[in-house]
Image (tube, rainbow, N blue to C red):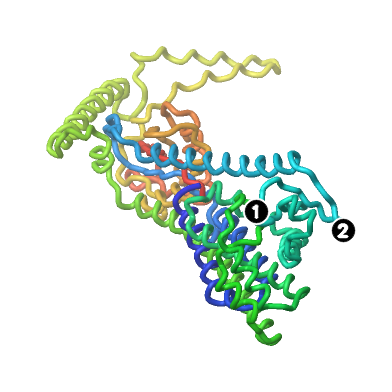
Amino acid sequence: MDSSKIILLLGISFLCWLIYKLVLADHKLFVFNRFFLLGAVVISLVIPFIQIDIAQENNPVTRTVNLYYIQEVIIGKAPQPSFNWYKIVTYSYIIITAFFIIRFILGILQITHRVYKNKKKTVDNIHYILLDNKQIPYCFLNYIFVPGEDFLHKNIESEILQHEQAHLFQKHTLDVMFIQLVLAFAWFNPFFWLIKQSITANHEFLADEHTLRLSKDIQHYRKLIISKTMAPYHNQFASNFNFLLTKKRFIMMTKQTSKNKVRFLKLSGATLLIAATAFGISMNAKEKESVTTSLTAKLDQITDATLALTSTKSDTTKLERKAIISKKIKELNADTATKRAEIIKKYNKSGELKNSDFPPAPPVPPVPPATPPAPPTPPKAPISPDAYAKVDKEAAFPDGIEGFRNLFIHNFDNSKIDGKGIIKTTASYIIDKDGTVKNIVAIGPNESFNTEVKRTIETIVAKKKWIPAQLNGQNIASLFRFPITMAFEETKKL
C-alpha cells in the first residue's frame, strides 16, 4: 500500500470516528451504533482500493516516464544512500505486525486451553466453563467463564450472569475479534484504536440495556457495577462484566431518546457515512488524475541537462558535471560527423549509389517470342537515409512537433516495457510525397521499448498524415528520425 492510500485510510477512519462522536455516541442507538462502527472500519479499509477514472485515458499511468528529444543522455550510477529509510520502515512494520498477529493467536489459544482444561456445565443451552479461581465472569463466543464453586453454590448475582448472557446472545466476541485482527495489520492507525474503544463501550451499553430490561432495579445494578470495577483484566477477546466506563454507563442507563429523534439521528448518521464514503472515493479518483497531470507537467519542464545532473555522482560539483556533459556531447557530434561523411562518400550529388561501391545490375534478358514470362527484374540497392537529406522545406506534423510529442506521450503504453532505469532508442521513418508514413524502424537495446515506440508512432500516423518535405517547390519523400530516452523510475499502483 503506497503513501496516498495510507493517508486516505487515515482520513476516512477519522471522518467516520468524528461522525460517531459528534452525532451518535451520546444517544441510545446502541444497535445502530454497533453496525455503524463496524461499517466505518470496513469502509475505511475498502475505499483506498476503489479506483475511478476521471480522465479518459487510453493507458493508465503506472510509472514515472521522462521523454527527451536529445542526442545522448549522460548516465552515471545513482548514489546509494547509506541509510535506507524505506527498509527501516518496512522492517519495523513487519516486526510490529508479527507481534500483534502472535498476540492474537496466543489469545485465542489461551481461551481455547481454558475451555478444554476446565469442567463444563450447560444450563438452558448456555455453556458455562467452571474455573478453579475466583474472578469476574466473562464471555467468549458460546461460552461463559465463571468461578466454579460460586456458580455451583449460586453465589453469583443474577445480574452479572444476565450481563454476560447478553454478550453471548448478541455475538459481541465476533466484533472484538474482527477489530483485533484489523488492528494487527493497521496498528499505525490511531482512529482504529479509538473505534475499538467505542465498539467495546457500546457492547457494555447493549449488555446493560438487556440486563435492566430483566431486573428493572437500576440502583442495585449500579451498586453491583461499582463493587466489581477493580476486578482483573482477563483476555483481549473476552467480554466481561468489568469495564472502566462506569460513569458513561450510568448516564446511558437513564438516557431517554424520543422515537422521532432516533429516526433523525439514524438518518443523519447513515447520510454522513455515505457522504464520507463518496468523499473518499472522489479523493482517490482525484489523486489518480493528479498523478497524470503531474506526469505531463514534468515532461514539459525537464531537460536533458536536468537528467544528466541528477544522474552523475553526488561528489561532483555543478561545474564538473557541466564539463562532463559538454565533453560527451562534443565527442558524440564528432563521431556522428565522421560516420556521416563516410556514408556520403558512397553517393553522388543526385543521391544515387556510386557504381564503384556496388556491382552493376545484371542486364535484363530479351523477351523470347514464346509465351514464357520474362525473368524478374533484380531488386534495387537499398537507399541510404542521407538520400533524403537535401530538402528546401522539411516535413512537418500538422500540429507541430509539440503536438506530435503530446500524442506520443498520450498513446505510449509504458506498462508494456520490460525493464527499468534509463532506456534509449532511435526511431526513424520515411514520410512519402503525400504525407504517408512508412518503413517505421526503432533501434535500441530494449526490444520491448523498440516495439512499443514503433506501435505508438503507427497509431499516431494512422490518424494524421504529415506535411511532406519540398525540394524546388515539389513534394518529395524525406526521412524523419529522432532519439528517444525514457527514465522508468518506479511503479505507482493507482
Nearer the observer, disc 1 or disc 2? 1
Q: Using the image as rendered, state which of residue 165 and residue 424 is in the foreground.
A: 165
Q: Badge 2, how many Cα within 10 Å: few under 14, some, many 20+?
A: few
In this view, the residue farthest toward the right is 124
As drawn, 288 above or below 448: below
Residue 72 visible in the picture: no
In this view, the residue farthest toward the left is 319
Q: Give the image quarter of residue 431.
A: top left
4 with respect to 72 (left or right):
right
Q: Using the image as rendered, state which of residue 8 and residue 307 is in the foreground.
A: 8
Q: Using the image as rendered, state which of residue 215 and residue 437 is in the foreground.
A: 215
Q: How far is mark 1 from mark 2, CA to CA?
A: 23 Å
Give, as a three-letter code, the residue at label 1: Gln
As drawn, 127 above or below 162: above
Mark 2 element type: loop
Residue 398 visible in the picture: yes
Q: Using the image as rendered, state which of residue 195 and residue 145 is in the foreground.
A: 145
Q: Which label number is shown at residue 135?
A: 1
Q: Residue at x 65, y 58 (%)?
A: 240
Residue 485 x, y percent position in the rendering = 36, 37
Residue 253 x, y percent position in the rendering = 65, 77
Give, as a three-letter code, the residue at label 2: Asp
492 with respect to 205 (left or right):
left
Q: Badge 1, how many Cα within 10 Å: few under 14, some, many 20+?
A: some
Q: Residue at x 78, y 59 (%)?
A: 154
Q: Which label number is shown at residue 124?
A: 2
Q: Earlier in the sequence, mark 1 or mark 2?
A: 2
Q: Residue at x 36, y 50 (%)?
A: 401
Mark 1 element type: loop
